[in-house]
Structure formats: structure tokens, C-alpha cells
Amino acid sequence: MVDVAGILITGLQQGAIYALLGIGLTIILGTMQFLNLAHGALYLVGAYTGLLVVREISVQEGALAGIVADPTAFGIGSSFLVALVVTPILMFAIGVAMERFVARPLYDRSEVEQLLLTFGLALIVEELARQLIGSQPFSSYAPEELFGVVVSGQANIPFVGQYPRWRFVVIGLTFLLIGATYLVIERTDFGMVVKAGTRDSEMVRLLGIDITRSYALVFGVGAALAGLAGLVGGTIIDVAPGIGTNNALVPAFLTVVVGGAGSVVGAIVGGIVLGMVAAVFQFQAPQWSQIVLFGFVAVFLLVRPEGLFGSVEVGE
Amino acid sequence: MSDDARTDGGTATADPNLVDRLVAAKHSERFVAVVSLVGLLAMPFLLIDVLGVFDDLIGVGLGGFVGLPTLILAFGIVAVGYNLLLGYTGLLSFGHAALFGAAAYAAGIFSNEVVASPVLAILVGVVAATLLAWPIGFLSIRRSGVYFAVLTLTFGQMLYFYAFGPGAWLTNGDDGYTPFAVPGGAEIAGAVPTSDSLSDLFFDLTGLTLTLTDGLDVTVGYVLTALIGVAAIVTAHRIIKSPYGLILKAIGQNEQRVAFIGMDVFRYKLMAFVLSGVFAGAGGGIYALSKAGLTVHPNATLYWIVSGDFVIMTALGGVGSLAGPLLGAVVFEYIALVVQGITIPIIDFQIGSLWRLLLGLAFVLVVAFFPDGIYGALSSLGERIAERFGTESPTGDGPRPVEDVEETGGDD
């Protein structure tokens, strides 16, 4: 018998990454009515950033070898923590730049043109990754230990049995990030503007709030979340140029339509639901797992097109 | 050809000016048929023989290979049908790879299991894609905009993963399926080999050497493909020019308004989807034919990125025009299959896998600066020339219909 607890944990871990991706996509979609097919490319950039940072700051083979003392000597664990700080900052900057140069000229143009242009952009990013870094997959860069605690290897968990320790760290980390984002959206002025913007961006503008600045911030936050999802996801699957479209873009879109476009809570719940559905069938019938996942979304879209927590209807 | 369904034959007969007469004549069906036949038959010559000259002159392999024109036309026919959906009805489908791939597999399986006849195989492909387009369209049409795109994507991906895993008994999964795996290759109606060139066929039939076509890389299979291509183009032309096409275009511009005047929008949208499925089926069948002895793989036929390729071809060439998608398919496949093999001499730089980067760049630039696509840019240039030399242009003022479609494609 396949362990139910094991399936649940796997589903939770996969779903948390979907949620992280979905939040970024949904706030951009909700606030600006902008469809970003390059969201998967941002995930890809995040994963490669993580990979490069971890490699370059590691004492064994990186550029800093011999210059800086062993990062593990600081007692903080590994270069993964550095990546955890560097990635969102870099991705935020990329997101802001993207809003300015890619999204802004397209706000007044049709949905189809937005899709087409960002799709072309995704192709370019993927090919650049292939050209600059190569198409070979890099295996996981998950650290050995964090803050002195061993996080690699298998742990013997009650009700679950042998399970990789790192997966628990991933679940904790993604939920921490999701929680932080949720608080920012729910409790800060910036969050208020975002939430109001998803309802009626015209009214926000009329109230005298500089929504153009907010747009850039929203895009930056969305990109940072996608990058973090890539960084975390890259510790679980091999990093290769195709992961942006295969492992990120499509799940992110499914998450958003299941959760309801524009809804942060919807993205969280939708992501976890999708992760669970995928995980159950991964254990029971691996060949059917993806088919069931897509079938689930199709039925869901037909029965409840506004999603679980849908507030805005995009393109309906 | 990009122009709307207004009949403007009157201008042609009233004015004897040659330029005006040519501009007006391009709307007639016979003109479209003749031009597309000449164009399609000239394509192998231009791609292989003319561009091939550069191979010898400067050592850069610009010329195509024998199978290239068939492949281009396979995708071109799909793009022409896809344009009926995206360019006219304003529906962005991300599931057309499912129709294309299903047709390719159906044609391939038919060729091995029943009879290795290219004509029948393509017919089977068309039937398979049509039958599949009906339920997918029936369900997806209920939603619009992004939701329509995601729904078509989910159905397409289900088929893709089915072909990969559980359906491997039928499709051979990741190993790929070999259509026309019969000794001697594909034969038209079991008699004429499709791989031979026309001059060989002429020699076989008459015992004479056809010196005129010496070096012309037109194969019998390509002639068959070109004839189907002409049929597809003429059909699309007729649909676009008919009142039916006008309704599709009206739906693309303002769905509510069409509903208000009492039209059954759902039915028209479904028919547009099914019609585009027929074209996708023909393209898929031809694709299977072009892969005789090689393999048809899920990644190259059923994967959603292939749907994206159809979108790219259509938008690159120009949505809302008849010739645009064909032009887009030529550019796309040429970059994909020929440019990637080019080595720039002196610096000895091989472009190789950069082709998708080039394609992405070309695509972004075209969408950003020429929303009407390559054909749109060319035809506005042509219009300016016609205005310069003709006494009056039938499409002189007012926005071109291409732009109309673009503007309102997504605000439903």
C-alpha cells in the first residue's frame, strides 16, 4: 500500500511551488490585465541564478574558491542562503525592467498580442540559456546543511517512512514565502493598491494613486516570486533550459485558472490542489498523472470558470 | 488578398489601367488558384535550385533540401486554417497541435495497417482531425479569451501525454511512429512512387528524358502536396470571401453585436474551429507523408509548443490575410530547418541551435513593429506602389481589415 502521508507531503511540496508561481502570475494578471507567457522564463532565470550563485560561491569549484573562507564556516549553512537573498533582488530588478520595456507598451493592445510577444520573449530567454550555459541538465544544488542542521539525505518520519529531509525544508521555505507575500498583500498599503487594482484599476487611478509606480512594483514582486519558485524548484528537479515552459509556465497558468484570476488566496489553494492531484496519480498511475491533471483542470474550467476564489474575469 | 469581402470588381472593368486591373483581379478565385499553383510549384525551385546556387558561390548552405517544400506546405496549410480561427474569428487556440498530431498519427497508422496510399492517408488524417476538433471545440468554445486558450491547451496536453505513455501501444510512445513503413515507400494509389522526381516519372512513363526539368527538385509527392495546398488556399479564399467568412470576421470584431442581430454565435465559432481542424488534418496527413520511412514523434506533432509554432507562423506572416500564414510558414520552417545548418564563412561561426533565438527575435520585432505581420508590411508597401502608379486604388483610404481584426481580437 502506498503511504497516504507520503503522497500528501509530496503533493504539498509540489503544490507550494505551484502556488509561489501562481501568486506572481495572478497579481500581474489581476492588476494589469496583462498575460505574461514569459513567467516560466522568469522561473528559469531564477533556477539558473540559484545554480550559478551556489556554484560560484562554493569553496570547492567556484570563482571565490580560495578567496573567501568556507561559507559553511560562518555557521549559516551554505551558499544556498546567499542565493536566497540574491535571487529575489535580481529578479525584482528584472521584473521592473520588464514592466517598463515589455509590458507597458502592450497594456492598450489586445490580449493576443500580449500573449504573442511574451511567448516570443520566453523563446528568446530559453534559447539564451541554451546558448550561454548549454542544454545539459544540472543536477540538484540542494545544500548539505543549513544553520548547522543536516538537510540532505533521508529521514525516518513517523507515518511516512523514509523521506528526503530537503523536501520538508522546501515545504517550510515556500510556505514562509507564501505567508510573507500574503501578509504584504493583505496588511500593507502596497497590498491595498494591488488588491484594489485587481478590482478596478481605473478607480484607483481616479483616487489619485500613482498606479504606474505600483504596476512596476507588482511586476517586480511577481518576477521575484517566480524567481524564488525557480530557485526552490531547481533544488528538486534538474535545471535545464526546458524547465521554464515545461515545469513552470503551464502549471502556473493551471494554478491561476483553478484558483481564480487575480486572487492570491486562490493561487495558494489552487496550487496545492493541483499539487495533490498530480501527486496522488504520480504514485498510483504515473503514466496517467499528467493526463488526469490536465483533465481535472479542463473539467474544472467548464464547471467553474471563475475559479475557486475568482474576483475578476479575464477575457470573459 | 488581405482585403475584405467588399466586391470591387466594378473598378476593374471601368478603368483600363493595368495596375488597377491587377489589384482588382487579385480578388477573383481563379486568380488565387493560378497564383497559388504557380507559387507552390515554383517554391522547390526557388528554395533548392535558386538558393542552392549560393552554396557553390560563397560556400554558405542557403539552399533547402528535397523534403523541405513538403514540410513547409504541411505547416502552411495548418497555418492557413489556423488563421480562420485566430485572424478572423479572434480565437486563440493553444491546442491545434492535438489536431495536427492526431491527423499525422491517424494517417501514419492507416498507411501501415490498411493501405499505403498517400491520398487516402491524408483523407484519413482530415477525418481524424475533424472528428477530434468537434468535441474539443464544442467544449472549449464555451469559454473565451484566456480560458479558451487554456482549455484547448489542456485537451491538447492530455492527448500528448496519452500518446507518450498509456497510448504507446498505438503510437509507439517516445520511440516515434514510422508511417509508410512498407517496402518501396509511399505510392500514390499504389502505383506511382512519391519519392521520385518528376523527370524520373516522365522517363518511366515515356522513355524520354525531360531536359526542361533537369535539376528541378520537384518530386511526385510534392506535386500531390501542392495540389492539396492549392485546394486548401482556394477553400480558405472562398470561406473568407463568403457571407459566412464575413460573419466569422464580425464575431472576431464584436461578438455581442453579432449575437444581438440574431446569429447563433456559438455555432459559427464551433464551425470556425472545426474548419480550422480540417486544415490541420490535411497538414498533419501531409506531415505523415513527408515522414515516410522516418518517425513521427509526440514532441514534434502533439506538444503544445507546436501549437505555439502555428501561432508564430500565423502572426509572423500576418493574421487576417490569406497569404500571410503561408509566408509565415515559409519563413518559420526555413529558419528552423535551413538557417540552423548555416556556417558563416570567414569567422567560421555556426548558427546551429541559435535558430530559435533568431526566430524569437524575428517574432518579437514583427509583433512589436509590424502588427500586420510580414505580409501586412509587404502589402502596405504594395498599396503605396499601386497608389503611385494606378489612377485610383480600391483599398485607398480607410483602415485595412487586418488592423480591424488586430484591434478587437481580444476585447470580447
Image (tube, coloured by chain):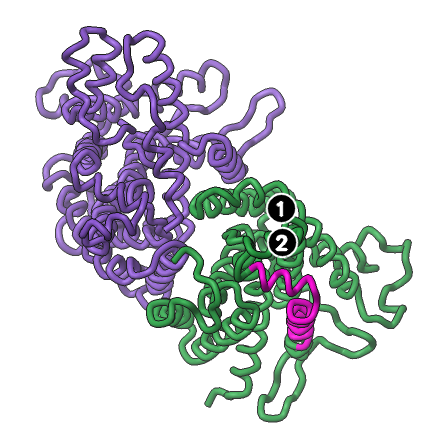
Chain colours: A green, B purple
User: Of the residues shown, which amino acid type is indicated by label 2?
Assistant: Phe
Residue on which the image places disc 1: A98
- Is the residue B223 above or below the residue A133 in the image? above
Q: Which residues are magenta?
A: A172-197
Counting other residues with Cα less than 10 Å from the Cα at mark 2, is it few (<14), some (14-19), or many (20 or more)?
A: many
Dot 1 crowding, Cα within 10 Å, few <14, some 14–19, many 20+: some
Residue B42 or B21: which is nearer the viewer? Answer: B21
Residue that appears at 47% across and 33% down? B366
Query: Are the two marked residues, 1 and 2, in contact with CB atoms closer than 8 angstroms?
Result: yes
**How far apart are the two marked residues, 1 and 2, measured between alpha carbons?**
8 Å
Q: Dominant secondary structure of the magenta stretch?
A: helix
Residue B108 in view of the camera: no
Farthest residue to the front: give it. Answer: A207
The residue that appears at 57% across and 59% down in the rendered structure is: A197
Pinpoint residue B222: horizontal percent, then vertical percent: 23, 32
Dot 1 or dot 2, earlier in sequence: 1
The x and y percentages for residue A46 are 65, 56
Which of the two residues, B109 or B82, is positioned nearer the viewer here? B82
Residue underneath mark 2? A219
Chain under numbered label 1? A
Q: Is residue B377 left or right of residue B323?
A: right
